[in-house]
Image (cartoon, grey):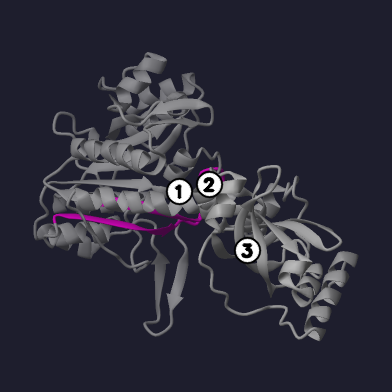
């Protein structure tokens, strides 16, 4: 067993003292009728005299964050999910027995208070205790108030302590579900149906990513944890649901950095009779609606850059974006050899799997354009080779009707005019198998059932995927995904 610190020994002794007094150190249910932040909101504007006249009685509970005691009276601050409030405890008001229990408390203990709302001579809103109830003993001391958990790794590892000590962490935790509710409200308002599709999938598809593999004993079959929700959702479009979306977890067995976690949340939406441009309108509308609903504004600051989410976003083709930065026009017909030469001249290293002009265009974009984009920008017309599920562009079949949304150098959304030609889709799946043979472990497998679904006929369809975690980062101004996940994955200590 680990060795106890002096403070931990003292707290255990106080726990024993409570037991000796007939008090359960880990308490029982407690009925509240108010919360700390709500009391502040409702009564802080009144004067000391007005509050005395009102004689408001409240019952609250929370964790002791600060305390000081002198003789027969003491002050402490307790915190609940809405905020903190000061408590004033006097021996002559709560009685000898309860005051003895009060004397045994520590910072971190959880207590219940019934009393009246007042203001001190200094004008501080306070609850004057009439009853003091011990609810739960804290056997470990909290970190120092002013330093909290200064080690960022420790903050993510012990998120429960971070939430106690760090109001910002709590604010993000409370904002995230509001963002998700607003996304749902917006898509529902667009006439889309929210659905659920399986997390365990027998075939790898819908994105280019390395999967997690697991085994189902009863069926004696290997399954993948899904890397995308795309193919099941498009089957529902074939089935006539016309507009569907799913907010859910995806799993990718890949590296971790400021914007990547092995499990993450996305929303994918598919709309029959729409296309790439319809998906631009949908996402533009979503960003505007959600920021207004959650933040009350469409002008936000992200990591020092002011962004406008309420105006129409810039729309530019990938080739035009590269031309703006490098002067090279990839719209011109060129051979793979010519493209390879340009790559060599511009310090772009090619791997075995980069076996087409399209791959080189994509590498140019990544190196020279992606990080330079600040304001919300739809980059569209992606090369065919890197978009196995998108429809070919009618004017130039080397490119597809696909876009990605970039803000401050990061990708937020990926959208297509969906490929609904089953013959073309089968060929592209087979191309993916060739890539797999060349050592690309992110290439898709052939989903024969999906091709069969397309053979029944899928209407022209627009589809889009938006990373919820990155969207939350954007709206809460966080530079790392770990701040917006309550439990990010960590290496073992």
| Mark with earlier residue (1, 3) | 3
Q: Residue at x 43, y 83 (%)?
A: 217
Tell me if 401 is positioned left or right of 100 in this view.
Answer: left
Residue 488 in picture, x, y percent from top left: 57, 56
Question: Could you give the CA–CA distance between mark 1 and mark 3, rounded to whole angstroms?
Answer: 30 Å
Q: Nearer the viewer, residue 267 or 463?
A: 267
Q: Residue at x 24, y 33 (%)?
A: 399
Q: Secondary structure at mark 3?
A: strand
**Looking at the image, residue 169 lies above or below residue 35:** above
**Looking at the image, residue 28 lies above or below residue 273:** below
**Looking at the image, residue 47 lies above or below residue 375:** below
Residue 22 in picture, x, y percent from top left: 76, 86
Q: Is residue 161 visible?
A: yes
Contact between labelled residues 3 and 2, with CB atoms less than 8 Å apart:
no
Q: Quadrant of the C terminus?
A: bottom right
Question: Could you give the CA–CA distance between mark 2 and mark 3, rounded to whole angstroms?
Answer: 29 Å
Q: Quadrant of the N terminus?
A: bottom right
How many numbered markers are drawn? 3
Tell me if 400 is positioned left or right of 141 in this view.
Answer: left
Q: Which mark is residue 469?
A: 1
Residue 263 in picture, x, y percent from top left: 48, 57
Residue 361 in picture, x, y percent from top left: 36, 29
Q: Residue at x 53, y 31 (%)?
A: 303
Q: Which mark is residue 481?
A: 2
Question: Magenta part of the protein: which range?
Answer: 242-269
Residue 20 included in the magenta stretch of the image: no
Q: Nearer the viewer, residue 279 or 426?
A: 279
| Callout 1 crowding tier (Cα within 10 Å): few <14, some 14–19, many ≥20 | many
Q: Nearer the viewer, residue 454 or 304?
A: 304
Contact between labelled residues 1 and 2, with CB atoms less than 8 Å apart:
yes
Q: Residue at x 35, y 46 (%)?
A: 466
> Residue tagged by mark 3?
62
């Amino acid at each position: 067993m680990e060795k106890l610190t002096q403070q931990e020994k003292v707290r255990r002794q106080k726990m024993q003292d409570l037991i000796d007094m007939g008090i359960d150190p880990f308490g029982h249910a407690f009925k509240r009728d108010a919360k700390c932040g709500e009391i502040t909101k409702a009564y802080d504007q009144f004067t000391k005299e007005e509050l005395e006249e009102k004689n408001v009685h409240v019952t609250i509970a929370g964790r002791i964050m600060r305390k000081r005691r002198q003789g027969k009276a003491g002050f402490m601050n307790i915190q609940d999910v809405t905020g903190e409030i000061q408590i004033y405890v006097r021996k002559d008001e709560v009685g000898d027995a309860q005051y003895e229990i009060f004397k045994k408390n520590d910072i971190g203990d959880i207590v219940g208070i019934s009393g009246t709302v007042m203001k001190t001579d200094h004008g501080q809103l306070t609850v004057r205790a009439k009853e003091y109830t011990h609810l739960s003993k804290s056997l470990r001391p909290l970190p120092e108030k002013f330093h909290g958990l200064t080690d960022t790794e420790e903050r993510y590892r012990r998120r429960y302590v971070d939430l106690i000590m760090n109001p910002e962490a709590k604010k993000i935790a409370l904002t995230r579900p509001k963002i998700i509710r607003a996304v749902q409200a917006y898509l529902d308002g667009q006439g889309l149906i929210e659905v659920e599709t399986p997390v365990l999938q027998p075939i790898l598809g819908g994105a280019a990513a390395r999967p997690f593999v697991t085994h189902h004993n009863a069926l004696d079959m290997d399954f993948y944890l899904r890397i995308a929700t795309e193919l099941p959702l498009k089957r529902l479009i074939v089935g006539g649901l016309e507009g569907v979306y799913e907010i859910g977890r995806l799993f990718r067995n890949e590296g971790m950095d400021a914007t990547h976690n092995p499990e993450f949340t996305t929303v994918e939406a598919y709309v029959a009779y729409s296309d790439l441009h319809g998906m631009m309108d949908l996402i533009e509308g979503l960003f505007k609606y959600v920021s207004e609903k959650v933040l009350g504004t469409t002008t936000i600051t992200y990591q020092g850059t002011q962004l406008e989410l309420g105006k129409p976003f810039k729309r530019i083709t990938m080739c035009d974006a590269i031309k703006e930065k490098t002067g090279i026009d990839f719209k011109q017909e060129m051979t793979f050899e010519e493209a390879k030469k340009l790559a060599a001249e511009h310090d772009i290293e090619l791997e075995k799997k980069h076996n087409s002009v399209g791959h080189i265009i994509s590498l140019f974009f990544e190196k020279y354009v992606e990080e330079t984009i600040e304001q919300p920008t739809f980059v569209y017309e992606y090369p065919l080779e890197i978009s196995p599920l998108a429809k070919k562009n009618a004017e130039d079949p080397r490119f597809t009707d696909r876009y990605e949304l970039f803000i401050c150098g990061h990708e937020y959304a990926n959208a297509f005019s969906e490929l609904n030609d089953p013959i073309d889709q089968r060929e592209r799946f087979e191309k993916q198998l060739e890539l797999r043979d060349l050592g690309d472990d992110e290439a898709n497998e052939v989903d024969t059932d999906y091709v069969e679904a397309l053979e029944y006929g899928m209407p022209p369809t627009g589809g889009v995927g938006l990373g919820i975690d990155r969207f939350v980062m954007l709206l809460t101004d966080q530079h790392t995904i770990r701040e917006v996940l309550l439990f990010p994955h960590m290496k073992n200590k």
